[in-house]
Image: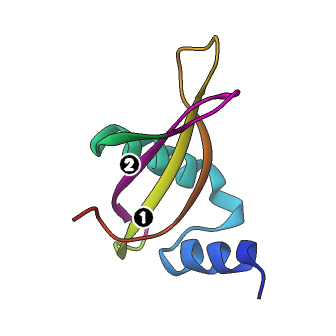
Amino acid sequence: MSVGRFKAAFFVALGYSVADWEGLATDLRGHAMNNEAVGTEANEYGQKYEVRGRLEGPTGRAAALVAVWIVLLGEDFPRFVTAFPGARRP
């Protein structure tokens, strides 16, 4: 099973679908707004941030999620990079 399929299965289990990708995008932005962003890797492209917290899907089922965002050099807003199942920081 590829990584992409694993992530897709994770989000489907929370009640998201390809047809409602906007709902997932909205919830990922909410996840970033409601949880602490911690700077991780800085490179020639910009500064990456990791956001850990719970994401509740449309069905009410929730799971721990790690979302990665980047602020590119010369920009002042974050761009979504990836998200995957994960635990909260200790």
Q: Nearer the viewer, residue 54 or 18?
A: 54
Residue 83 occupies which quadrant of the picture?
bottom right
The vertical placement of 67 against 6, above or below, is above
Amino acid beneath label 1: Leu
Quadrant for the C terminus, please. bottom left
* For the residues bearing labels 2 and 1, Cβ distance under 8 angstroms: yes
Labels 2 and 1: the sequence-earlier one: 2
> How many neighbours does mark 1 have within 10 angstroms: few (below 14), some (14-19), or many (20 or more)?
many
Q: Check the image and name the residue furthest to the left.
A: 90
- Image colouring: rainbow
- SS type, badge 1: strand
The vertical placement of 23 against 47, above or below, is below
* Residue under label 2: 31
Write the residue at 64% across / 68% down. 17
> How many neighbours does mark 2 have within 10 angstroms: few (below 14), some (14-19), or many (20 or more)?
many
Amino acid beneath label 2: His
Q: Is 42 inside the magenta-drawn segment? A: yes
The vertical placement of 39 against 76, above or below, is below
Q: Is residue 5 left or right of residue 89?
A: right
Quadrant for the N terminus, please. bottom right
* Residue under label 1: 65
Q: Is 52 inside the magenta-drawn segment? A: yes
What stretch of residues is rendered in magenta? 41-58
Q: Position of residue 71 (x, y in %)?
A: 57, 26
Write the residue at 66% across / 73% down. 8
Image mark for residue 38: none
Q: Residues under labels 2 and 1: Cα distance? A: 9 Å
| 2 or 1: mark nearer the eye | 1
How many numbered badges does the structure rendering display? 2
- SS type, badge 2: helix
Name the chief secondary structure element in magenta: strand
Q: Position of residue 49 (x, y in %)?
A: 47, 40
